[in-house]
Image (spheres, coloured by chain):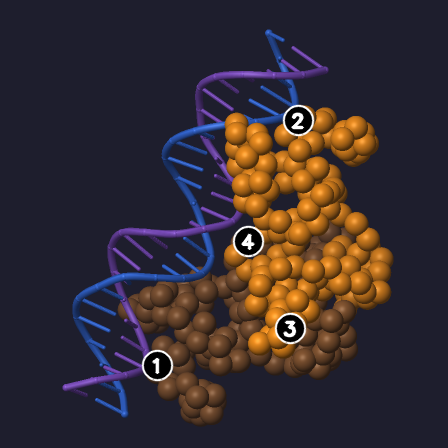
Chain colours: A orange, B brown, C purple, D blue
Amino acid sequence: MKDLKRYLQKKGIPSSYHRLKILEYLVKHRTHPTADMIYKSLSKKIPTLSKTTIYTTLKLFRDKGIVKELSISENETRYEINSIPHAHLKCIKCGKIYDIKTKLLLLKNESVIEGHQIEECHLYFKGVCKNCLKKQKEK
Amino acid sequence: MKDLKRYLQKKGIPSSYHRLKILEYLVKHRTHPTADMIYKSLSKKIPTLSKTTIYTTLKLFRDKGIVKELSISENETRYEINSIPHAHLKCIKCGKIYDIKTKLLLLKNESVIEGHQIEECHLYFKGVCKNCLKKQKEK
DNA sequence: ATTCTTGCAAATCATTTGCACTTTA
DNA sequence: TAAAGTGCAAATGATTTGCAAGAAT
């Protein structure tokens, strides 16, 4: 918890109880949660917590480079702690999102492709995850 | 227009005036439009057209493999005629979406990655498009 | 005559906003 | 005490749904 506090400060974000808890959640749950998932989980222990704070905090974290927004889901934004570049797979059966190792995303910031200046690179797969495949076979 | 009609029928979709017009729009405007953009443009000439029809038709087209949905924009779904695989760049200045040629997306359907069965592959870039770069330099 | 297509209005759901209250430096 | 953080309720905006009317086969 102290580490998280220091981490926020290093990123230029004054730490508050809510921010620490949201950051802690993201560190512990590498499940690419939605704002609502974070809210539902944290509000059990922090009844006064509001969704607005979740949204405000996630935007702040994003602007400071602490989290990344994934638009792999059509209707909802998902969040993950910023880390080494990787791809994502969303399972069309169970909806879970998996990290996928890849070397493709190592293109440097400010690369130029077809005349455009690239800042971000997202590689998404959709398909059936290995757990759902296993369940299918068992039937 | 007759070609479009035939095209729909080949895909197993009974053609109707509205469906043809929506398909025609998508063929002519390779701008990855939203449902609303299609609606705004077509309803000028077809005042009775409703947004519900746009949504219904786009879902039908998607299910029949005629269009692809892009979730490169956070809050809105964008559509394009299904064609050879390519990547996309969304300009963070002007919002335009560009097609990007790439060989990376030629992985076959049903490929398996890390145990998961892949059905779709999306490669998105975000950055500054060449037109916006040019405008920046001119200042 | 039955089935498909369409349109309207209302509902839904994620996210944002305005504003007032509270906490903190 | 001013600035930052938070919460509530209402607003927004994209998409969906229920249902009834219209068109097509």
Amino acid of disc 1: Tyr
Q: CA distance from mark 4 to mark 3?
A: 25 Å
Q: Which chain is indicated by disc 1?
A: B
Would you place residue C23 above or below residue A120 in this image?
Answer: above
Crowding at mark 2 (Cα within 10 Å: few <14, some 14-19, many 20+): few
Nearer the camera: disc 3 or disc 1: 3
- Whole-percent x, y for residue A92 in the image: 58, 68
Find residue A76 and name its label: 4
Q: Which chain is indicated by disc 4?
A: A
- Whole-percent x, y for residue A67 in the image: 71, 45
Looking at the image, is mark 2 or mark 3 earlier in the sequence?
2
Q: Are marks 4 and 3 on the same chain?
A: yes
Crowding at mark 1 (Cα within 10 Å: few <14, some 14-19, many 20+): few
* Residue for badge 3: A133
Q: Are marks 2 and 3 on the same chain?
A: yes
- What's the residue at 80%, 63% (across, down)? A101
- What's the residue at 64%, 73% (across, down)? A133
For the N terminus of chain A, the quadrant is top right
Find residue A121 and name its label: none
Q: Which chain is indicated by disc 3?
A: A
Query: Hey, which residue is sitting farthest front in the picture?
Result: A138
Q: Is residue B21 left or right of residue A100?
A: left
* Residue for badge 2: A17
Q: Is residue A36 left or right of residue A126?
A: left
Q: Secondary structure at mark 3?
A: helix
Q: Are marks 3 and 1 in contact (CB under 8 Å)?
A: no
Q: CA distance from mark 4 to mark 1?
A: 33 Å
Q: Are marks 3 and 1 on the same chain?
A: no
- Whole-percent x, y for residue A91 in the image: 62, 66
Task: Looking at the picture, tell me which residue is in the foreground, A71 or A132.
Answer: A132
Looking at the image, is mark 4 or mark 3 earlier in the sequence?
4
Find residue B17 and name its label: 1
